[in-house]
Image (cartoon, helix red, strand yellow):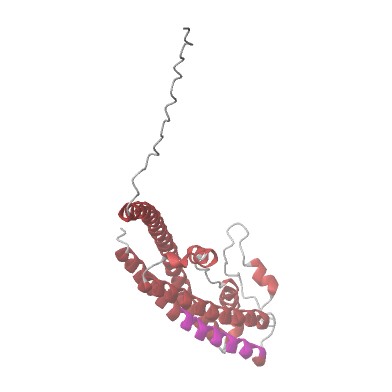
Amino acid sequence: MNYLPVHNKPHRIMEVHHHAHTPRKKLTHYFWEFLMLFLAVFCGFLAEYKLEQTIEKHREKEIIISLIEDLKTDTVLISDQLIRLKSNKGIFDSLVNLLTSPGIKETGADLYYYGRWPFRFSFIKYTDRTIQQLKNAGSYRLIKSATVSDSILKYYSNLEQLYDLQDQINERLEEYIAKSRAIFDPLVFESMVDDATNNITKPTGNPPLMTYERKPIYDLVSVIHNLKSGNRSIVREILARYNEGKNLIQFLKSKYRLK
């Protein structure tokens, strides 16, 4: 009896794939991640802020040093100007005495000498390089101390008032020049100026005035009186600015620990 061979078919084994489950992150894990990120950003901000503060502090000190140099320049200029302005009183007094003297016709050389000096009166321009930079660049905010800021503003505000006074005196000088044309011979004035040195020298002989009439002469004396009064006022104001500038230099040096 023939038997058919029995073929044993292999059984397929079903593989069951189990999905890997990662453990769920706890809320505390997210919290610490957020905290670390926050701290990193915050520390970066602090570092940048600190750097900016350091730069601004350095810039503030540079501004103060520059301002002190301006003030030093001003004190030297003011000191020289005070010497010239104080000498004006003697010139004005001499000119008034000569113009009102009974012997006016015998003092021509002295009259022309003293009469020529007011043409040379001038005023200094104070050094405002740093303060103008502060205003134009909007850098005044760099000065953190209110006391320092107020002291600087007060000094330069007083200088503006001084400029106004100088303008008033310049107007009187222009009036003097205009009225002196009727009194003094311009050719004599021209001969008194040394071309090489630009110095004024007293003319030789006894050059006559253009007129000896009382009214034009006393009109000029009146202007000289006003100039003398203005000169006295500006000497007082400039001396005050000189002392104020010196005190401001010492204050700034002490405040910023500068030598």
Q: Position of residue 82 (x, y in %)?
A: 44, 73
Q: Quadrant of the C terminus?
A: bottom left
Say if the magenta span includes residue 234: yes
Magenta part of the chain: 216-235
Horizontal side of 5 relative to 35 (left or right) equals right
Q: Where is residue 137 in the image (x, y as percent from the top left)?
A: 53, 63
Question: 164 or 238: which is nearer to us?
Answer: 164
Overall secondary structure of the magenta stretch?
helix
Q: In this view, does 25 lie above or below 232?
A: above
Q: Position of residue 139 (x, y in %)?
A: 48, 64
Horizontal side of 85 relative to 173 (left or right) equals left
At x 47% / y 11%, what residue is drawn?
5
Question: 239 or 218: which is nearer to us?
Answer: 239
Question: 127 or 117: which is nearer to us?
Answer: 127
At x 50% / y 78%, what residue is drawn?
162
At x 66% / y 89%, what residue is drawn?
216
Q: In which quarter of the image is residue 217?
A: bottom right
Horizontal side of 63 relative to 197 (left or right) equals left
Q: Which residue is most to the top?
A: 1
Horizontal side of 245 relative to 234 (left or right) equals left
